[in-house]
Amino acid sequence: MKRKKTIFLKSFPDLFKAQLAQGLLESHGIEAMLMNTNFSMFNPIFKKSIDGIQMYVFEKDYAQAKVLLESEPLEIDENEILEIDE
């Protein structure tokens, strides 16, 4: 069985932003793996020393993933309120 090579794509300062980016990529059929999620959550002091939460993708998906992350804003408007009908 041939192994697929993964490659570093981007690092994120927190888990929330990393998961937003992961969801964006997966919605386009690109599998994204997050590294250092538990360690950075366990002790935030070490975030800088481990370069935050790191995202890896398969080498074949790298170019498309990079374009998607650069073209899609991942910021959430803090003033926006989500209304749920009960």
Image (cartoon, rainbow, N blue to C red):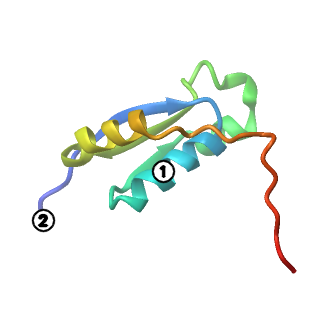
Judged from the image, the secondary structure of the residue bearing numbered disc 1 is: helix
**Which is more toward the observer, 40 or 81?**
81
Q: Identify whether 47 is placed above or below 36.
A: above
Could you tell me which quadrant the C terminus lies in? bottom right
Tell whether 40 sits left or right of 21: right
At 54% from the left and 23% from the top, the residue drawn is 51
Q: Amino acid at mark 2?
A: Met
Disc 1 marks which residue? 22
Residue at the spot of label 2: 1
Residue 34 falls left or right of residue 66: right
User: Nearest the camera: 52 or 62?
Assistant: 62
Q: Nearer the viewer, residue 23 or 82?
A: 82
Give the crowd class for mark 2: few <14, some 14-19, many >=20 residues within 10 Å: few
- Give me the residue at 59% from left, 19% from top: 49
Q: Amino acid at mark 1?
A: Gln
Q: Position of residue 69 (x, y in %)?
A: 41, 38
For the residue carrying disc 1, how many other residues have a C-alpha within 10 Å: few (<14), some (14-19), or many (20+)?
Answer: many
Answer with left or right where residue 4 lies relative to residue 71: left
Residue name at image x 12 percent, y 65 percent = 1
Q: Residue furthest bottom?
A: 86
Q: Which quadrant of the view contains residue 83?
A: bottom right
